[in-house]
Amino acid sequence: MMVFPSYYNKNKASELYLPRYDKVVQEATGIRNERKIAPAGSDQIKIALFVIDMQIGFCHPDGSLSVPGAVDDVVRLCDFIYGNLEKLSEIHLSLDTHRAYQIFHPSWWADKNGFHPAPYTIITYNDIQSGKWMPQFQPALAADYIKRLEAAGKYNLCIWPFHTMLGSIDHALMPILFEAALFHAIARKVRTNFEIKGEHPLTENYSVLSPEVKELTDGSDTLNVGSFNTKFFNALMRNDRVYIAGEASSHCVKATIEDLLDIHEANPNLVHKVYILQDCMSPVPGIPGVVDFPAIARQSLQRFKDAGMRVVNSTDSNAMDAVL
């Protein structure tokens, strides 16, 4: 049954405001009591919603890494939460979390004149060797990171604008989504899980489940900079079904689902637990003549579908059917 709280206004989804705690809790409690909604802990079929990085920095039109279409994605996701309140057992939300000095930020690098690279600059291992760009911190480890990144064959290091920094407003969830998650928590008597990612200064962390590089060496010592997040993976997979949404479909969503797929290949039965809400995610725009991120996102969705994951829309009449 679709139930929207009185305060919920999807036409104001892009607005930034303080949480309306009292209204959310009051209405969620009222609906829980009126409809006699059972606590999530009593669900016979466990269904999780996993939301990747739907933060202000990625979703608000003025965010430093705003994804076109993200506001509409958030609205559809909120509709999905309110409309499936009694079926969703738990909600997991990842938060991309950064600080001033990280290897993918301009502040980590400088040229021979001391100037930092502009956002979206690509830095290669050859650039370090030639002195075009020089790491300002832990140079041996930074060079090893870029060498390992290139050896993996995924991409070169891209310098990103400052974004979703810890303590900043753009680190927070979009307010309309935060209220939907809080409403669910009160109505279902269940804790919302927040998963922090991206804090280590010496590696990127597109995937919620693992960093791009797990260890580095300076020639003598080896430094562990991250590992697969087994605890979180197990928390997701204890459910009978996991719905995935988030930003961006070409980057963090894609990388996370790829990690899930890698693990699932050893256990094909787990693949069929994954449902991808394709209308609750959008790609980063392409760079003409350089890279087509929307095409990469579409190709990835098809690959996930071919592997046995379900690709659905939040508005599909059977998106939450009881086929389990």
Image (cartoon, helix red, strand yellow):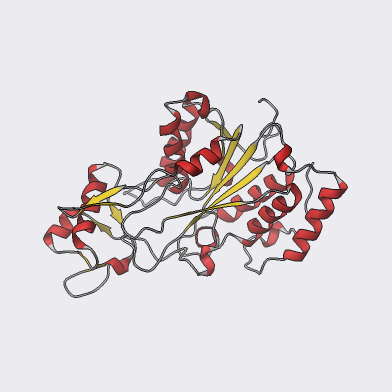
Q: Which residue is drawn at 64% across and 48% down?
A: 77
Residue nearer the viewer, 315 or 185: 185
Residue ID at (26%, 42%): 152
Q: Which residue ends up furthest to the right in the rendered image? A: 34
154 left or right, relative to 56: left
Q: Which residue is drawn at 60% across and 35% down?
A: 239
**Residue 246 appears left or right of 230:** right
324 vs 95: above or below: above
Give the residue at the far left of this rendering. 130
- Asked whether, in this view, residue 207 is left or right of residue 61, the answer is left
Q: Residue 287: percent from the left, percent from the top?
A: 37, 52
Report the residue at 15% width, 53% height from top.
Answer: 220
Q: Quadrant of residue 245?
A: top right
* Residue furthest out toward the front: 221
Can the viewer see residue 46 in this picture?
yes
The reply to whether residue 118 is visible in this rendering is: no
- Taking depth in this image into account, of 196 and 64 the one nearest to the observer is 196
Direction from residue 30 to residue 266 in the image, left or right: left
- 80 up-or-down from 129: above or below: above
Exactly how many numbered labels are in the figure? 0
Q: Position of residue 18 (x, y in %)?
A: 66, 69
- What is the x, y in percent for residue 268? 48, 24
Q: Residue 84: which quarter of the image?
A: top right
Quarter of the image with the N terminus in it:
top right
Say if 200 sits above or below 311 in the image.
below
Image coords of residue 235 (percent x, y)? 55, 41
Please state, as top left, top right, bottom left or bottom right, where the C terminus lies in the image.
Answer: top right
